[in-house]
Amino acid sequence: MIILQTFGDNNSSIFLRTDQLDGETDWKFRKPVPYFQNNAIIDNLEDYNINLIVDPPTKLIYEFTGVMEIKSNNNNSNNNMTQKIVEPLTLENTMWANTVLATKRVLGVVIYTGQETRSQMNSSLPRSKVGVLDIELNFLTKLLFILMVSLSLLIIIFKSFSGDLLSNIINFLRFVVLLSSIIPISLKVNLDLAKIVNSYRIGNSDLIPETIVRNSTLPEELGRIEYIFSDKTGTLTKNEMIFKRLSTEIDKFTPEHIDEIKLILNDECLKHNAPLMDVFKQYKKNLDTNAHINVKKVQRRDRSKVLRDAITSMALCNNVTPIHDEDGTLTYQASSPDEVALVSLATSLNMQLIHRSEKEIIIKNANNYDEKYEILANFPFSSETKRMGIVLRNVDNGHIIFFLKGAESIILKFVKERYKGHISENCEELAAMGLRTLVLTQKLIDQDFYDEWFKRYTDAQASLDNRNEKIRNVVEELENNMDFLCITGVEDLLQDEVADTIESLKKAGIKVWMLTGDKVETATCIAISAGFIPSTLKKNSNKMFYIKEINSKELIHHELDKIRLQRSQDSIMIIDGNCLEICLTELESLFFEVALSLPAVICCRCSPTQKATIVKSMKKYSTKRTLSIGDGGNDVAMIQEANVGVGIVGKEGKQASLAADYSITKFMHLKLLVLWFGRQSYKNTALISNFVIHRGLIISLIQVNYIII
């Protein structure tokens, strides 16, 4: 549905829980159509002629474009000409089916229903799973039947067809009956009993408690797995961000330095009630000789003032909304756990975000003073820009500050030259530790420059042709000559013993792929922490092949050829959702030829359908047995498509657990499930099968011997 209006407080934004759609537990930011939210005319909706133009139904859950055309039919209007208002619609104006409204109430118009919804288009019908052992035994049974018939015919032939035709037919049937023990009729019963016993052992083992066996016909399949496809969020990680490192140009801080940072902040907040005050004062002194921003004359600021600004930027440069519960508890809501982690860090350092609306932010500094900021412009993070910026005016002092944060590769383009070497070196060090890095910068904005810039920004927002491109071009006028503040390193906590489990599986000859709906940068950090990427590769990016942000089939083909020629035994391929879609639809054969030769593949921004398609295509291009493991509703299709599906009971509910063949509570249990119980089950069923078949063959051969004699 399209969100027309929200109800609750002055802040019109809302948050959704989308874990059952995309598997991500972080809350997603959404906003209503500005025209209806600002004019509050929902009660008189019948007075308006509204035309909605939206994308046709598609499986893509991260993309949406549309236009809402509004024509007023108000009879009280003195203007005879009907005014048409055009409101562009983006993904931020939508609520998909299978998402949960986490805040407030909304009023909207439904655009997709039933089979047209994103969740239904990404779902698949369940199928009955048959183990490869059953298929192999069925084939052997057919061969044994042919052998029985052949032996009976040979005996008749050697007896030279004595007697008439009827006698020969009767003799042939007699020999068939005598040799019928060659067919293992009792094997099916024996195998079913063995599978029941093996399933009981798995479900009642103290080594993997609370494991539920939902399909008792596949225990031996666990011992034949060669490919594992794993979700990330909630499966490999806890989705809890923990602060590990804060690096400024001069200092490096860890959680052990919290008290030291608090003392510095307290001292600086006593001196000034806003960031960049030293630069702003110098700017005002030199206003007569500087027509533009006069930050260049500040050679090197005091380390304490830089640290104060860095912590302040964490509380200000974000899209986090503080929520005050009835009991007075302050909680934070955001679409990214990284932002919540940084705001929580700032709060622990006595720089607390206490209020946020579309037009204002209030933080309580270390001196218990409420710093108020007017939001002049906000540029949210997107997969295209890979950065987030915000333009604020300090209410008390009137100076304008532009904060910008983002990935190292992006921010390096906008900072002053003297910071670039330091940023690259520190980000590489933190990435080698498996931490998620973020670079924070700031800049003082001249009022005259801002007034001229804002006019161009407003014109770009009102444009109907190439709106996003025009807005980006205008915003880039701000993103230059930025002052470096700090680099933050946060750790996305892994589930218990994830790295050890993956290492054990790899040593057993099992290849593990990660299929996630998260960003490339985030997935890469988790891949390093979880052990997908060998330690030898952490400092050797030449063996980490990225295929991302490419929309051309030819260019992707070139990248795949490059990987095929340059790959080694420990090379890793990391691919994003758009490139993966092209590979699966137009370059499927080449993609899997390259992927099968690599020890691991990381697929990012995957939709539920893409996850299932990868597993299905793997079975097409390889005879290996596959296992899929996940914990959310978006993993159900992948779990059902694999030869063996494993669901984890976690924060995202039991949808994956109920659809899986085996339900476990922790990823670490997969090691015992596959390498111990799976192997034992396979060995036991193989021994029973061999015994029953050989027993029948021995009895039949004895019968043949006596018949011939």
Image (cartoon, rainbow, N blue to C red):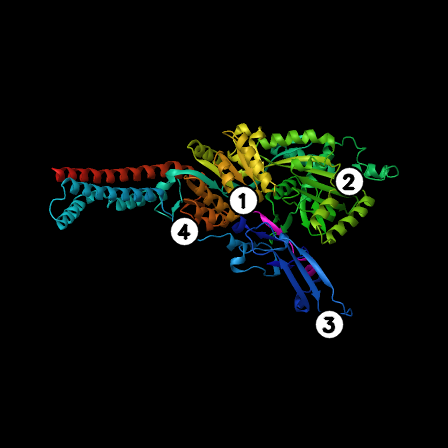
Say which residue label 3 marks.
Answer: 75
What is the quadrant of residue 627 in the picture?
top left
Of the two numbered discs 2 and 3 on the same chain, state the one appearing first in sequence: 3
Q: Secondary structure at mark 1?
A: helix
Give amino acid for label 4. Answer: Arg
Say which residue label 4 marks.
Answer: 127
Of the two numbered discs 4 and 1 on the same chain, state the one appearing first in sequence: 4
Q: Secondary structure at mark 2?
A: strand
Magenta span contains residue 25: yes
Q: Secondary structure at mark 3?
A: loop
In the image, 368: left or right of 296?
left
Give amino acid for label 1. Answer: Glu
Asked if residue 202 can be seen in this view, the reply is: yes
Q: How much space separates mark 2 and mark 3, taking CA atoms?
A: 50 Å
Q: How much space separates mark 1 and mark 3, taking CA atoms?
A: 55 Å
Look at the numbered discs 2 and 4 and tell me whether their residues touch, using CB distance below 8 Å. no
Q: Position of residue 270 (x, y in %)?
A: 75, 39
Give amino acid for label 3. Answer: Asn
Q: Which mark is residue 586?
A: 1
What is the quadrant of residue 72 in the picture?
bottom right
Look at the numbered discs 3 and 4 and tell me whether their residues touch, using CB distance below 8 Å. no
**Would you call the spot at circle 4 few (<14 residues within 10 Å), some (14-19), or many (20 or more)?**
few
Look at the numbered discs 4 and 1 and tell me whether their residues touch, using CB distance below 8 Å. no
Give amino acid for label 2. Answer: Leu
In the image, 357: left or right of 447?
left
Of the two numbered discs 2 and 1 on the same chain, state the one appearing first in sequence: 2
Say which residue label 2 marks.
Answer: 444
Quadrant placement of the C terminus: top left
Of the two numbered discs 3 and 4 on the same chain, state the one appearing first in sequence: 3
Between residues 391 and 34, which one lies in front from this camera angle?
34
Q: Which mark is residue 689?
A: none
